[in-house]
Image (spheres, rainbow, N blue to C red):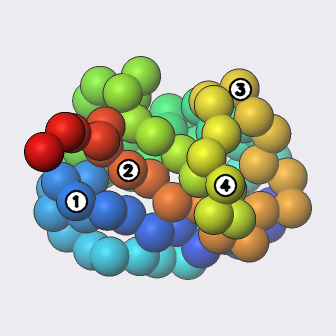
Amino acid sequence: MSSVRLVYFAWVRERIGKDEEEIVLPDSVVTAGDLLRHLKGLGEEYEMALEHENVIRVAINQEHVDHHEPIAGAREIALFPPMTGG
C-alpha cells in the first residue's frame, strides 16, 4: 500500500467537500481508472462526485493522463470535471 495526495477541483471538490487529502491506496489500485472506482467506494459524497467517472479528467504529477495510465510513483493526483468553454 502506498499513500498519495489527491487534489480536487471545481464541482468534484464541492461534491466531495474537500480541496485535497492524503490517502493510502490498496495494491489493487493500479491505474487512474482503478483510483476513480476505489474512491467511489469511500462514501456517498465520492460516489456522487464521480458517478460519471468517464468524464472525470485526471492529472498525475500535473500531467493529464487517460484512465488507463498507471499511477505507480505518483506524488499528486488531481481530479477535474470536464472543461467548459467560455
Amino acid type indicated by mark 2: Phe
Q: Name the residue under label 4.
A: 63
Label 4 or label 3, whichever comes before in sequence order: 4
What percent of the width, then of the height, locates residue 10? 22, 59
Q: Point out which mark residue 80 bears.
A: 2
Residue type at the position of mark 1: Ala
Disc assigned to residue 10: 1
Question: Residue 4: horizontal and vertical position, in percent?
Answer: 67, 69
Q: Position of residue 32 (x, y in %)?
A: 64, 39
Question: Extreme front residue here?
Answer: 86
How much space separates mark 3 and mark 2, taking CA atoms? 16 Å
Numbered badge on residue 68: 3
Q: In this view, does 68 lie above or below 72?
A: above
Task: Give percent across and percent down for residue 68.
Answer: 71, 26
* Structural crowding at the residue carrying mark 3, measured as other residues with C-alpha within 10 Å and reported as few (<14), some (14–19) or many (≥20): few
Q: Which residue is at 27% across, 74% downward?
A: 18
**Which sits in the foreground, 82 or 33?**
82
Residues tagged 2 and 1 counted as in contact (Cβ below 8 A): yes
Quadrant of the image containing the N terminus: bottom right
* Secondary structure of the residue carrying numbered label 4: strand
Q: Are marks 3 and 2 in contact (CB under 8 Å)?
A: no
* Amino acid type, mark 3: His
Quadrant including the C terminus? top left
